[in-house]
Image (cartoon, rainbow, N blue to C red):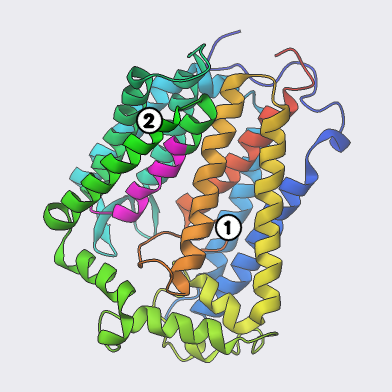
């Protein structure tokens, strides 16, 4: 059987549908449904309603999840190097022929439809890192392995930072960090790594950030200093979240979204729209669904048969979790504003499809525990 065509065994991947982790599937679909409805509410007062397009992405994503779950994840492992090279090639291409949106050249496409190569690169980098670290047959990874992992991660990070899209670039840090921790890293290496990160952060602040990026950090520290300028977005977001109170104002009744006070309300700040319309109770429901997705994915990692599968799920869950953590903290002013969307809820084709594919990939890994594939 060839590498490219290796699919789930000739036998069914799951002995029966009851063997599938339905909680992961249901959580994904419920989050996507909530996201589609919230995108409609957030964009209904805009010149274009993004709900039909988001519903199309969700439908395609659900189909992609089924396909990914049916294929043998080992096909991706076998093609890890080729996939990584392809992801890097897309990042190079977007710097040359990409479209500018939101201040960054981060899209390749035509008309209303496009691909964000950064999302593809996250996945291909995760597969290659898992494949590489799985080959280390020691209790702890050494400096050589850490260095190689840093280089593999640093290349796509650098290309994404050149767009410039520092938010997407930063998402590679939890990706590689989670994998290295599971692969085995000594504490002295962790401490040394943190010191290096602090030094690099200082250098980035003085030499690597644009003025508007420094302003975002300064706005995070003191948003009231410029409430009508750089601090406007976070101030309006906090008003939206706070005004939702316990039960919210009702669907499509939020003043911050319907009266257009809240910018980027269908993408980066969709969580603020949700909080205003459905209040604390709605937020809790969504966070519980995220917890269900994360905990069940980790449970699948625990019972996975192979080291590469454990590492791959760890990296993908770290990436997913950090998106949720950063975005929800950002909309309430706990972290600086960056273009980090919320999985399954924020509008976006590439991001939605990748999240569904990741879900299917985790299900594929779970299915392999039943067969000698």
User: Which contiguous range is marked in magenta?
Assistant: 164-177
Nearest the viewer among 142 and 166 is: 142
Nearest the viewer among 235 and 273 is: 235
Q: Is residue 170 left or right of residue 249?
A: left
Q: Position of residue 246 (x, y in %)?
A: 68, 85
Q: Position of residue 166 (x, y in %)?
A: 29, 53
Residue at 72% across / 46% down in the picture? 24
Nearest the viewer among 35 and 188 is: 188
Residue indicated by mark 1: 344
Question: Is residue 175 magenta-colored?
Answer: yes
* 271 over 192 or under it: above or below: below
Query: Badge 2: few (under 14), some or many (20 or more) residues near its Cα, within 10 Å?
Result: some
Q: Position of residue 202 (x, y in %)?
A: 20, 52
Residue at 57% across / 42% down in the picture? 317
Residue at the outermost front position: 188
Q: Is residue 221 left or right of residue 72?
A: left
Q: Are marks 1 and 2 in contact (CB under 8 Å)?
A: no
Residue 242 - label:
none
Residue indicated by mark 2: 189
- Per the image, label 2 sits on a secondary structure element best described as helix
* 115 over 88 or under it: above or below: below
């Amino acid at each position: 059987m060839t590498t490219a065509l290796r699919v789930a065994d000739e036998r069914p991947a799951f002995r029966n549908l009851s063997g599938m982790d339905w909680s992961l599937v249901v959580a994904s679909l419920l989050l996507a449904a909530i996201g589609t409805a919230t995108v409609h509410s957030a964009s209904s007062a805009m010149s274009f309603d993004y709900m039909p397009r988001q519903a199309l992405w969700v439908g395609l994503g659900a189909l992609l999840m089924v396909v990914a779950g049916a294929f043998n994840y080992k096909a991706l492992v076998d093609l890890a190097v080729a996939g990584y090279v392809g992801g890097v090639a897309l990042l190079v291409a977007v710097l040359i022929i990409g479209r500018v949106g939101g201040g960054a050249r981060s899209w390749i496409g035509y008309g209303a439809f496009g691909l964000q190569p950064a999302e593809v690169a996250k996945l291909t980098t995760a597969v290659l890192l898992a494949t590489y670290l799985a080959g280390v047959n020691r209790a702890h990874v050494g400096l050589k392995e850490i260095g190689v992992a840093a280089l593999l991660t640093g290349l796509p990070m650098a290309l994404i930072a050149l767009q410039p899209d520092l938010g997407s670039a930063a998402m590679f840090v939890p990706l590689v960090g989670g994998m290295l921790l599971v692969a085995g890293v000594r504490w002295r290496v962790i401490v040394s790594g943190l010191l290096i990160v602090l030094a690099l952060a200082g250098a980035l602040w003085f030499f690597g950030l644009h003025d508007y990026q420094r302003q975002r950090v300064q706005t995070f520290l003191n948003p009231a200093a410029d409430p009508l300028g750089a601090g406007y977005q976070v101030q309006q977001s906090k008003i939206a979240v706070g005004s939702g109170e316990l039960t919210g104002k009702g669907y499509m009744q939020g003043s911050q979204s319907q009266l257009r006070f809240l910018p980027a309300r269908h993408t980066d700040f969709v969580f603020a729209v949700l909080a205003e319309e459905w209040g604390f109770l709605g937020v809790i429901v969504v966070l519980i669904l995220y917890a269900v997705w994360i905990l069940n994915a980790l449970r699948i990692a625990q019972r996975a048969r192979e080291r590469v599968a454990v590492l791959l799920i760890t990296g993908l869950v770290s990436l997913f979790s950090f998106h949720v953590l950063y975005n929800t903290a950002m909309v309430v002013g706990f972290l600086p504003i960056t273009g980090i969307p919320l999985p399954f809820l924020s509008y976006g084709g590439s991001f939605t499809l990748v999240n569904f594919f990741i879900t299917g990939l985790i299900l594929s890994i779970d299915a392999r525990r039943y067969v000698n594939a």
